[in-house]
Amino acid sequence: MVSRQDDRGSEIRTRIDMMKNSIVTITDNALQRAKSLLNNDSELIGLRISVAQGGCSGMTYEVALSKEIKEGDEVVNKDGIKFIIDPGAIMFLLGSTIDWKEEKFKQGFTFQNPNETARCGCGESFSTS
């Protein structure tokens, strides 16, 4: 027989997992690009998403291939692909959508972030309030 305590613990874990997966939304284009990048090296386990100081508006998004999950990282799983969110970036990324776009002269991961209050003219950096 499963105790009420076990049921409650399972429910809490499920809610925590749902919250982690709602830190960011991953589009199908971003997912497909991540899969193609990660398929090239069996040591890679996911894409690391972080925010760094830089650019003319103050902060930049960074996406890198990752071979490890560090203490404090949050992992968003989508179709077996791990998007590893740096702990320092979580508050900046809440509610963001990560996409992959290919244009005539530019390609890369893009971020639609409801927390942005400004973005530089070239679109490479942003700020929040």
Image (cartoon, grey):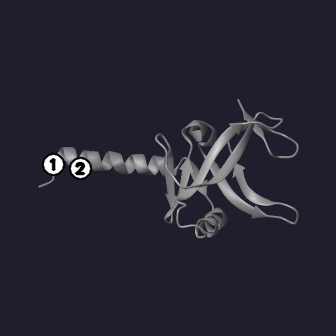
Image height of 57 relative to 31, above or below: above
> 67 or 60, which is in the foreground?
67
Q: Secondary structure at mark 1?
A: loop
Q: Name, please, the residue furthest toward the top.
A: 129
Image point (62%, 66%), residue name: 28
Q: Secondary structure at mark 2?
A: helix
Image point (39%, 48%), residue name: 15
Q: Which quarter of the figure is the N terminus placed in?
A: bottom left
> Residue 107: x and y, percent?
79, 61
Q: Is residue 75 visible?
A: yes
> Residue 35: x and y, percent?
59, 67
Q: For the residue carrying disc 2, how many other residues have a C-alpha within 10 Å: few (<14), some (14-19), or many (20+)?
A: few
Q: What distance separates the C-alpha of mark 1 from that of mark 2? A: 6 Å
Tell me which corner region of the image, top left, top right, bottom left or bottom right, holds residue 47: bottom right
Going by the numbered disc 1, the residue's amino acid type is Ser
Left or right, 105 with reference to 117? right
Image height of 113 relative to 91, above or below: below
Q: Which residue is mark 2?
A: 7
Going by the numbered disc 2, the residue's amino acid type is Asp
Q: Which mark is residue 3?
A: 1
Image point (51%, 52%), residue name: 68
